[in-house]
């Protein structure tokens, strides 16, 4: 088969056609990125080329007001939740824990104009139509609701005060949809995949059942999917954990691709996922980040990557990569090199 561009390869996979080879996805922590660049002697773009990454991503930039943090906090979300700890940390308070509908209406919600989209077009144009471009706001409305309510409290309120949960979800998604509209107005013709993220699974299964998922989550996923489809984009959802029981509802909502499939989590058998849903939704990831990439050797990584490819690549609808988007610093660089080299060499159609 004639060699495709990265963009052609990815779009073929999303159409469940077999491209020239399985596309590659490289998601990383800053710490691993720095380590890999130093070890391989390349800059970030050189590293992505070395790994055969078929994607590039464009971002809006926050240009809103600066908020003074309390002494305990190390960061603040755009929705006013202060956090502390390593990385993004954990919330130190839940400002809507006891809110009623009036309090939700009076809460100081952010303005979509705080996100600057003026550089989006230039970011995308520099790739000259060669790569599949990811764009749109990340839109983690489920995580923001957890921050605002507290996780246990949120689950309880879904039963006791569903109208309050719905009002907060609506406000959250109103913001994210408006930001993505601005991004797509600026450069929607240069973007290929609307990439959003919400983790609805844990290692032991889904974080909420199909009934609650249908009521409180599906309408908002559908709204975002419709927004992307209205601009001619594919819509990919990042979702960690064992969320297999929710996949039919994600498909119903209009999600085109799921990232990053974690086979070590409950219910995420790759063979079953491929058999049950492989012709309905694209799978991205599935090469175990922990037991294979961190704990393995070059030889075991190569062997396990080939096993995943044997299951997932037939018929298209698969993008190869790690089972968690943020490859961690403790991951051996040589193992990641082995994974991507195997995808490119063994993943040919």
Image (tube, helix red, strand yellow):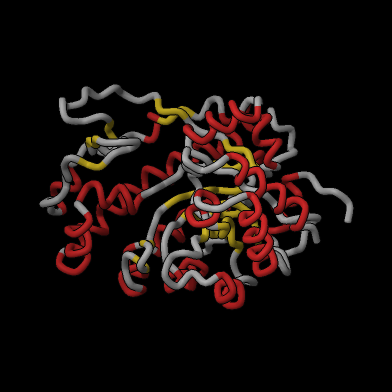
Q: Quadrant of the N terminus?
A: bottom right
- Residue in the foreground of this view, choosing between 190 and 310: 310
- Residue in the foreground of this view, choosing between 151 and 136: 151
Q: Is there any visible trace of residue 191 in the rendered image?
A: no
- Residue in the foreground of this view, choosing between 303 and 241: 303
Q: On the rendered structure, is 62 left or right of 316?
A: left
Q: On the rendered structure, is 180 left or right of 210?
A: right
Q: Name the residue at 76% across, 57% down.
A: 346
Q: Vertically, is 150 above or below 118?
A: below
Q: Is there any visible trace of residue 5 in the rendered image?
A: yes
Q: Name the residue at 52% across, 37% down.
A: 183
Q: Vertically, is 263 above or below 5?
A: below
Task: From the top left corner, tell me how far across and down residue 96 is, in percent.
Answer: 16, 47
Residue furthest to the right in view is 2
Task: From the top left corner, tell me how far across and down residue 125 is, in percent.
Answer: 68, 30
Q: Name the residue at 49% across, 73% down.
A: 248
Task: From the top left corner, tell me how far across and down residue 214 is, in percent.
Answer: 37, 70
Quarter of the image where one finds residue 132: top right
Quarter of the image where one finds residue 318: bottom right
């Amino acid at each position: 088969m004639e060699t495709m561009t990265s963009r052609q390869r990815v779009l073929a996979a999303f159409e469940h056609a077999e491209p020239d080879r399985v596309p590659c996805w490289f998601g990383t922590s800053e710490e691993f990125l720095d380590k890999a660049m130093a070890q391989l002697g390349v800059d970030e773009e050189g590293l992505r080329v070395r790994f055969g990454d078929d994607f590039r991503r464009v971002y809006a930039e926050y240009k809103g007001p600066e908020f003074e943090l309390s002494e305990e906090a190390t960061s603040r979300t755009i929705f006013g939740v202060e956090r502390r700890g390593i990385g993004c940390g954990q919330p130190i308070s839940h400002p809507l824990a006891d809110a009623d509908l009036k309090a939700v209406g009076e809460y100081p919600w952010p303005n979509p104009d705080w996100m600057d989209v003026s550089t989006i077009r230039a970011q995308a144009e520099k790739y000259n139509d060669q790569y599949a471009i990811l764009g749109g706001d990340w839109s983690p409305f489920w995580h923001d609701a957890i921050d605002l309510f507290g996780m246990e409290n949120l689950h309880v309120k879904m039963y006791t005060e569903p109208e309050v949960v719905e009002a907060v979800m609506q406000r959250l998604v109103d913001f994210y949809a408006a930001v993505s509209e601005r991004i797509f107005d600026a450069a929607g013709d240069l973007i290929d995949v609307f990439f959003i993220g919400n983790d609805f699974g844990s290692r032991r299964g889904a974080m909420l059942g199909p009934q609650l998922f249908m009521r409180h989550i599906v309408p908002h996923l559908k709204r975002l999917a419709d927004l992307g489809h209205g601009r001619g984009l594919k819509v990919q959802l990042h979702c960690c954990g064992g969320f297999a029981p929710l996949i039919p509802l994600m498909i119903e909502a209009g999600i085109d691709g799921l990232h990053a499939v974690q086979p070590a989590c409950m219910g995420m058998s790759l063979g079953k996922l491929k058999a049950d849903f492989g012709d309905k939704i694209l799978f991205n990831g599935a090469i175990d980040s922990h037991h294979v990439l961190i704990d393995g050797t070059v030889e075991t990584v190569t062997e396990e990557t080939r096993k995943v490819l044997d299951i997932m690549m037939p018929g298209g609808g698969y993008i190869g990569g790690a089972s968690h988007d943020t490859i961690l610093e403790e991951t051996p660089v040589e193992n990641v090199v082995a994974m991507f080299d195997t995808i490119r060499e063994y993943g040919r159609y």
